[in-house]
């Protein structure tokens, strides 16, 4: 009987951990607007569903509780933290640039995201 209780407890624990991981990886539904206080351009609509084949950490930093880019990446920039524009469009590590600015099937023009 003791083995059955131990096995049942282990199975429930693993199921609970698995469910927690599955829920944590679900992206928000619908379109969100990416912006920053003081930005000169209108917010950019972003649809997580269109990016579902990407890994979250291709855009989001691991280990941060707040997923909003503008929490750390401001229009002006902070000590040791790149400006919001550089975080999105920077040649080295820009979250959007890495897929949409270089040659290829996903290439977009600025006006495709930044509506006037």
Image: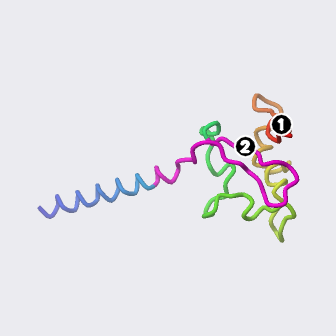
Read off the magenta span: 21-48
Label located before the other in sequence (2 or 1): 2
Pick the front one: 18 or 36: 36
Quarter of the image where the N terminus is located: bottom left
Q: Position of residue 103 (x, y in %)?
A: 83, 32
| Location of residue 23 with respect to 116 vertically, above or below | below
Q: Secondary structure at mark 2?
A: strand
Which residue is tagged 1?
Answer: 102
Which residue appears at 23% of the width and 57% of the height? 8
Q: Is residue 31 left or right of residue 84?
A: left
| Location of residue 8 with respect to 44 vertically, above or below | below
Occupied quadrant, residue 78: bottom right
Magenta run includes residue 44: yes
| Location of residue 69 with respect to 48 vertically, above or below | below
Query: Within 10 Å of the Cα at label 2, are there few (<14), some (14-19), or many (20+) other Cα atoms?
Result: some
Which residue appears at 17% of the width and 61% of the height? 3
Query: Within 10 Å of the Cα at label 1, are there few (<14), some (14-19), or many (20+) other Cα atoms?
Result: few
Which residue is tagged 2?
Answer: 45
Quarter of the image where the C terminus is located: top right
Q: Secondary structure at mark 1?
A: loop
Q: Residue furthest top?
A: 105
Q: CA distance from mark 2 to mark 1?
A: 20 Å
Q: Is residue 38 left or right of residue 52?
A: right
């Amino acid at each position: 009987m003791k083995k059955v209780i131990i096995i049942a407890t282990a199975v429930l624990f693993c199921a609970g951990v698995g469910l927690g991981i599955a829920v944590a990886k679900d992206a928000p539904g619908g379109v969100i607007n990416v912006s920053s206080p003081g930005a000169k351009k209108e917010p950019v609509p972003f649809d997580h569903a269109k990016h579902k084949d990407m890994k979250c950490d291709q855009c989001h930093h691991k280990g941060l509780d707040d997923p909003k880019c503008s929490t750390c990446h401001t229009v002006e920039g902070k000590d040791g933290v790149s400006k919001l524009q550089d975080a999105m469009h920077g040649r080295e590590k820009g979250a959007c640039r890495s897929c949409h600015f270089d040659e290829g099937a996903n290439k977009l023009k600025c006006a495709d995201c930044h509506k006037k």
